[in-house]
Amino acid sequence: MDAFIAGHGAYVPPWRLPREQIAAVWGGPPVPGERAVAGRDEDTLTMAVEAALDCLSGLDTDSDAIDAVFFASTTPPYAEKHAAASVAAVLGCRRDVITTDVTDTLRAATSALRLAAQAVQGGSARTALVVASDARIGEPDSLSEQMLGDGAAAVLVGDTGAVRLSESAAVAADFLGPWRRTGESLVRSFEGKFETEYGCRRMLVEATEAVLERAGLRADEVSRFVLAAPDPRTARQAGGAFGYDSGEPHDDLFLQVGFTGAAHPLLCLGATIEAAVAGERLVLAAFGEGADAFVLDVEAAETRREGWRGVAGSIARRGSGGVYGDYLKSRELVEQVPSEMRASPVTYQRDLPRELPLIGARCESCGLVQYPGGRVCDGCGAYRSLVEHRLSRRGRIFTKTLDHIDQNCYLTTPIPRAVIDLDAGGRIFLDVTDCAPDEVETGQPVELTFRLFHDGGGYHNYYWKCRPLAQEV
């Protein structure tokens, strides 16, 4: 059985930090462009959920049809807790879904893609979702601090689709760099040229040569080489070995987002698929203690889907420029007074089945949709007439307020909070994020976004917030 990419999605945080702002603090030369920065209420799990939802938007595939979920990252939210299971829970996948985390290497996404393709080819899954997300932190006053960016991407692998996964190959090499030891948060690296030449470029070339040989192809039979390198120059040098200019799509991603670690290969692939036409042949390669490479054949051009953003739309959806000091605080690189939020693992676990996948209730007597559900209908008072109902993730603001108190702390800039009338019924009270307080208006269309709420109790507490609905690109 063949394996195909049936759809892809992406998420790039709207907040961007100009690299010249970072350089100005340390007195060094700036790298051109800006880097995408995850917000205070975002981490690799929330970004992965965003990418997964974007991937599934407008597709015929329902979450119940997903047989496996793979989560790839070098910066998972937990050292010991399955992130793939959390993604599956938010999406509302079946209880018997296969969940697997692939971590600790920059080619985690392509390793997960290989596992997903093998599962489909072997018949153990008809549909597998691969989600890659990273938010790596470079050492302050280092080149990597400017070069890195945050983001996520997802691909849906199935037995039918627009892009065929035709061949794959891999090479392994015990190369030190970049790396992080257990318990460390900052990425370490050697001298840049040595690392990119021996740890990246040569690995990409070797894996690409191997997959071309296995597929029986010459380099001139490939339409586009998608060689996921940490910077456009290295990508071009690797592509040059095959007579190809691999600057695209790296240039736009690097200038507006940065190198997104494990998510970068799938972001580059998604951007390439969006520009490809039927009949093109692609080679995807990613490095990390060796390299993975794939041959992909585009059998149908990408078509726009309702609610889908893709890579281009995710990059275009941007907020105002960030402030370097806020970035340092959000990454806990400066000392702060910790907040004391109380939380109960028992209560959190009890509410997970309805809060993560947004399951409300619908009254079979009067049809009223409500959240959360109970035993008695809020509308007609009917007893035991409520059945489960999956809520829409879009709606309009019914009423709003500004709150200066958050996590037991007084905030000079208040947090907008609003009651949302959801499309297709239901009403929910949420924080508003990704905008300034004065940008929130009654009647404004919004979309729900999965976010990190707080870290009370020593664990991550996730829930939904909403953000103004950007105009579709």
Image (spheres, rainbow, N blue to C red):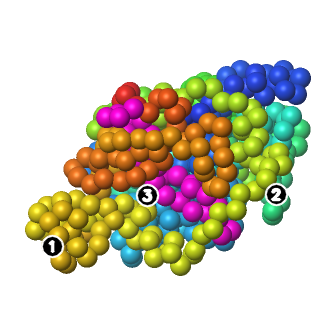
Separation (CA) of disc 2 from disc 3: 29 Å
Q: Residue at x 45, y 70 (%)?
A: 352
How many numbered marks have been drawn onto this rendered protein structure? 3
Looking at marks 1 and 2 on the same chain, the residue that comes earlier in the sequence is marked by 2
User: On the image, numbered disc 3 is attached to which residue?
Assistant: 129
Q: Is residue 288 left or right of residue 301?
A: right
Up-down relation of residue 266 to residue 46 (above or below)? above
Q: Residue at x 43, y 58 (%)?
A: 129
User: On the image, numbered disc 2 is attached to which residue?
Assistant: 184
The residue lying furthest to the left in this view is 365
How packed is label 3: few (under 14 Cα within 10 Å), some, or many (20 or more)?
many
Q: Is 318 or 431 nearer to us in this picture?
A: 431
Task: Please identify the quadrant where the C terminus is shown.
Answer: top left
Residue 285 seen in the current view: no
Kindly state the secondary structure of the residue where label 2 is placed.
loop
Task: Locate residue 208: give its quadrant.
Answer: top right
Residue 66 is situated, as x and y percent measured from the top left of the image, at 36, 63
Image mark for residue 256? none
